[in-house]
């Protein structure tokens, strides 16, 4: 697969961005304006575990959204958040032409990619260029490889909804486009995305993704321990999944261990159930920062953004702030994105966390990652080329028609001028010789025009006069003799054939392009009537 050139710049002014990750479907309808974006509509839907494998569930979700919001636009950007089918890998390669990078990287990637590299969708970005100790120029690159079956599943859903995919990107790369529009970002920062089934930590330098690490944390993993046996003042209780999720949303991470939750559940017990997960999260974040510094020559991030549906866990930002000893804030939409929807106030932070990845994908430009298969991009390019060629052809035809009108107008204008000149020549005797010369030229033009019959008009007249049952086999046109001979066949019984032939002659005789039309011969051959007609054309 060829190196992608980034997400298409040919997106329409209004377009969709869709994230069909496991457990949660997200869709946003965006409008691209001068220098900023506007969120027109969005929806988020939680799905059951078995619905993940059901493409119909995803197609129904998209089609319901299109119908509900009266969306007629077809362009859509896909965002992949499911990390099970995606590999993101950092490599260092010599500076090579773009077309050779894939081949050079293939041997290094084959040990880390558990699926077929030849059919996979692959793209990359250059992180930095440097010269090593031996004076060789090299590039640090970050590669993303997606399993062919995953891409095919996504595209199958999109095609079922009769939409036009313009690009496929990855959640971690999508945040780069958001970060570019946020003011006063530090040089190095990190984004923790806690999704329904997965979490990823991305480290960004200059708002460009440099490193990605998958972490043992998710929305679902936070809820699962709370369904274990809990101790309360009423004794031991066991919460359902829905009750545990409600407890998570209202109670969050207890900062006051003396606090009581629903049904007098002690905060200390809740904290003991989720503490192993939180400690593992902090440990992996620290390890990722250390790995980035020691192995990729990076700097420690000065800021940690948290986002995703799982980031709505109450007090998570305060907990991470204390444990990591660094500034931790929610990732919010940049000022360049308007998000005041009709009939409601601005999006709150919880709503932003759920759809911000899809919005980042919608903001991707030509510098972004694009995993759209080459054959799909080629098909789209061919369609654009055909449309362009059609427009050029129509434009050329319009220009030729305009030129024809100009020529006709010039002929009319020159004819009027010639008539005026003739009047003046007849009244002004001193220039009689000039008049005679002009009259001589006029006679020459008349002789030339006498031998010219407008062919296009004649053909139109014959086509208009010819009945549908009449087949013209041969036409002999002699302009100098002002004659036209038509030979043809009528597939009908004799009586009907004679009537059709008579009707044909009548139509020819009333035409302005035929002075007289007469039947030369008519002969019955089998089931057909053969005929020959001679037309005398007017002397123009």
Image (tube, grey):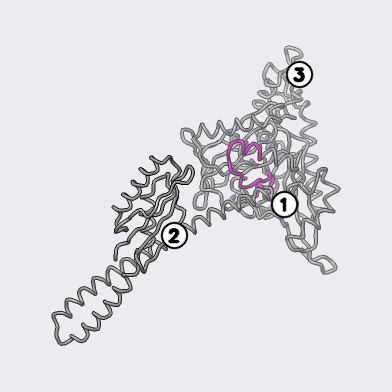
Q: Secondary structure at mark 2?
A: helix
Q: Which picture quadrant has residue 135?
A: bottom right
Q: Mark 3 or 1 closer to N-term?
A: 1
Measured along the vertical axis of the image, is residue 329 above or below residue 207?
A: above
Q: Mark 2 or 3 closer to N-term?
A: 3
Q: Secondary structure at mark 1?
A: strand
Query: Is residue 183 among the parts visible in the rendering?
Result: no
Q: CA distance from mark 2 to mark 3?
A: 79 Å
Which numbered dot is residue 230? 3
Q: Is residue 429 magenta?
A: no
Q: Mark 1 or 2 closer to N-term?
A: 1
How many discs mark residues in the rendered view? 3
Nearer the observer: mark 3 or 1; the answer is 1
Where does residue 194 sit, x and y in percent of width and height? 70, 37
Where does residue 58 sit, x and y in percent of width and height? 64, 32
Q: Which picture quadrant has residue 3?
A: bottom right
| Residue at image coords 71%, 30% | 53
Label 1 Cα neighbours within 10 Å, binned few <14 / some 14-19 / many ≥20: many
Label 3 Cα neighbours within 10 Å, binned few <14 / some 14-19 / many ≥20: some
Query: Is residue 358 among the parts visible in the rendering?
Result: yes
- Write down the region rendered in magenta: 155-176
Residue behind mark 2 = 397
Q: Secondary structure at mark 3?
A: strand
Q: CA distance from mark 1 to mark 2?
A: 42 Å
Residue behind mark 1 = 123
Q: Is 535 positioned to the left or the right of 290 in the image? A: left
């Amino acid at each position: 697969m060829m190196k992608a050139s980034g997400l298409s710049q040919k997106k329409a002014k209004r377009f969709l961005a869709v994230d069909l990750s496991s457990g949660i479907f997200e869709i946003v309808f965006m409008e691209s304006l001068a220098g900023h974006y506007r969120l027109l509509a969005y929806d988020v839907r939680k799905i059951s575990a078995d619905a993940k494998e059901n493409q119909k569930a995803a197609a129904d979700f998209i089609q319901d959204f299109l119908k509900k919001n009266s969306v007629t636009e077809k362009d859509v950007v896909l965002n992949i958040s499911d990390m099970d089918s995606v590999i993101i890998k950092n490599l260092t390669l010599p500076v090579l032409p773009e077309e050779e990078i894939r081949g050079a990287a293939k041997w290094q990637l084959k040990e880390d990619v558990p699926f077929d590299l030849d059919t996979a969708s692959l793209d990359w970005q250059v992180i930095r260029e440097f010269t090593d100790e031996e004076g060789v120029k090299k590039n640090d690159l970050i590669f993303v490889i997606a399993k062919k079956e995953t891409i095919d599943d996504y595209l199958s859903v999109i095609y079922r909804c009769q939409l036009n995919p313009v690009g496929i990107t990855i959640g971690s790369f999508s945040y780069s486009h958001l970060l570019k529009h946020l003011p006063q970002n530090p040089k190095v920062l990190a984004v923790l995305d806690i999704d329904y089934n997965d979490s990823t930590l991305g480290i960004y330098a200059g708002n460009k993704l440099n490193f990605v690490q998958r972490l043992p944390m998710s929305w679902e993993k936070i809820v699962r321990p709370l369904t274990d046996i809990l101790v309360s003042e009423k004794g031991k209780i066991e919460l359902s999944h829905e009750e545990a999720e409600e407890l998570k949303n209202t109670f969050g991470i207890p900062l006051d261990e003396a606090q009581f939750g629903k049904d007098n559940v002690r905060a200390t017990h809740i904290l003991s159930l989720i503490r192993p997960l939180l400690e593992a999260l902090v440990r992996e974040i620290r390890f990722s920062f250390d790995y980035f510094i020691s192995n990729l020559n990076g700097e420690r991030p000065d800021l940690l953004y948290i986002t995703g549906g799982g980031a709505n866990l109450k007090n998570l930002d305060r907990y991470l702030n204390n444990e990591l000893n660094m500034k931790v804030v929610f990732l919010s939409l940049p000022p360049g994105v308007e998000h005041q929807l009709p009939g409601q106030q601005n999006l709150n932070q919880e709503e932003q966390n759920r759809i911000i990845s899809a919005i980042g994908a919608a903001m991707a430009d030509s510098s972004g990652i694009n995993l759209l298969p080459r054959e799909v991009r080629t098909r789209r390019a061919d369609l654009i080329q055909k449309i362009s060629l059609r427009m050029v052809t129509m434009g050329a035809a319009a220009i030729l028609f305009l030129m024809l009108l100009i020529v006709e107008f010039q002929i009319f204008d020159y004819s009027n001028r010639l008539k005026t000149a003739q009047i003046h020549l007849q009244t002004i005797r001193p220039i009689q010789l000039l008049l005679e010369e002009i009259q001589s030229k006029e006679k020459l033009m008349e002789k030339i025009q006498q031998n010219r019959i407008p062919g296009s008009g004649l053909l139109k007249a014959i086509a208009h006069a010819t009945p549908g049952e009449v087949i013209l086999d041969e036409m002999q046109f002699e302009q100098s003799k002002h004659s036209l001979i038509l030979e043809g066949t009528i597939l009908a019984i004799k009586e009907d054939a004679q009537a059709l032939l008579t009707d044909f002659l009548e139509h020819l005789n009333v035409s302005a392009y035929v002075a007289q039309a007469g039947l030369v011969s008519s002969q019955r051959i089998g089931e057909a009537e053969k005929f020959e007609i001679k037309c005398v054309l007017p002397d123009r």
